[in-house]
């Protein structure tokens, strides 16, 4: 840290100490010291919010907050807050899911929770998400990607108790743009929507199976569940057909 940066970082503590000394003359040393510490923390929080807001507005031209514990933590906080707003739930929900995530290191979770609660994306939300997504994909620590997956599916769960194929595709696509591996997204989805079965699950195939295996699985299930067959099941037949059609369209 350069001398000027060190001075700026220590400014809240210095001002807090001066205020505490002044207040000690009126309220006594213990009370003055306490009020000084509280004042320093308020100043530090305000500075962090200002740095955070500037960085999230334009990550390419503004430096990340100096107190950021890991590259990309500020970006993750902004993305989680933006995703909450996109889903129509309060941005403070982002802080809650980051704090509650089992995959978040204690210090990182506390920092991002405070940051996300202060971030309220304004203006063009789609543009803001696109900018933050590109920056996160290029700069964030790999260790933050599972946390991003956990946060996004947790927010989806807060938005709706049920997850349909369209909602799953929407969230999974956003995570893929962040550089989150598909397996990490599937693990996060399974934690928050344990009863959900994606198209691969329906066909009984591992993700990414070749096209010919997808076709064989569909034919096997269509014969097994066809409504006109002896063990016909119209619901399972329809589920398998829709899964096959979606996977086929995705590869077209």
Image (spheres, rainbow, N blue to C red):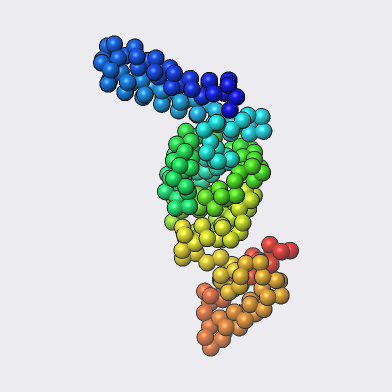
Q: Whole-percent x and y of residue 135?
A: 64, 40
Q: How many marks?
A: 0
User: Which residue: 49% across, 62% down?
Assistant: 190
- State the residue at coordinates (61%, 37%): 128
Please state the horizontal and vertical placement of residue 244, each as a whole percent of the image.
64, 70
Q: Is residue 120 above or below residue 14?
A: below
Quadrant containing the N terminus in the rendered view: top right
Indicate the position of residue 107 as horizontal and vertical percent values.
Answer: 45, 42
| Figure quadrant of the C terminus | bottom right
Q: Closer to the camera, 150 or 217? A: 150
Residue farthest to the left?
Answer: 28
| Residue drawn where x is 59% and y is 67% of the image | 199
Which quadrant holds residue 2? top right
Q: Quick one: 201 or 88, which is closer to the camera? A: 201
Q: Is residue 142 above or below residue 128?
A: below
Can residue 170 be seen here? The reply is: no
Q: Is residue 43 left or right of residue 209?
A: left
Q: 126 or 2: nearer the eye?
A: 2
Q: Quadrant of residue 24?
A: top left
Q: Is residue 160 above or below residue 35?
A: below
The answer to whether 179 appears left or right of 122 in the picture is right
Q: Is residue 184 visible?
A: yes
**Residue 224 falls in which quadrant of the image?**
bottom right
Pick out the residue farthest to the bottom.
230
Q: Which residue occupies the extreme right position in the image?
A: 252
In depth, the one of 245 and 199 nearer the eye is 199
**Residue sitting at 67 percent across and 33 percent down?**
60
Q: Position of residue 208 (x, y in %)?
A: 66, 66
């Amino acid at each position: 840290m350069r001398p000027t940066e060190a001075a700026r970082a220590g400014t809240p503590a210095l001002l807090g100490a001066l205020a505490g000394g002044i207040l000690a003359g009126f309220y006594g040393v213990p009370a003055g010291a306490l009020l000084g510490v509280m004042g320093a923390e308020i100043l530090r929080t305000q500075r962090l919010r200002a740095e955070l807001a500037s960085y999230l507005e334009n990550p390419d031209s503004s430096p990340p907050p100096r107190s950021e514990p890991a590259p990309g933590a500020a970006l993750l906080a902004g993305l989680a807050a933006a995703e909450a707003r996109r889903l129509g739930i309060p941005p403070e929900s982002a802080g809650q899911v980051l704090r509650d995530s089992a995959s978040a290191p204690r210090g990182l979770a506390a920092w991002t929770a405070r940051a996300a609660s202060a971030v309220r994306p304004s203006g063009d939300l789609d543009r803001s998400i696109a900018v933050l997504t590109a920056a996160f994909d290029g700069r964030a620590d790999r260790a933050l990607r599972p946390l991003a997956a956990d946060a996004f599916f947790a927010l989806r769960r807060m938005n709706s108790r049920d997850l349909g194929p369209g909602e799953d595709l929407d969230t999974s696509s956003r995570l893929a743009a962040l550089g989150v591996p598909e397996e990490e997204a599937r693990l996060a989805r399974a934690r928050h929507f344990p009863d959900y079965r994606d198209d691969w699950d329906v066909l009984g195939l591992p993700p990414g199976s070749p096209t010919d295996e997808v076709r064989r699985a569909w034919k096997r299930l269509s014969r097994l569940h066809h409504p006109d067959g002896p063990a016909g099941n119209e619901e399972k037949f329809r589920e398998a057909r829709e899964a096959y059609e979606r996977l086929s369209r995705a590869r077209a």
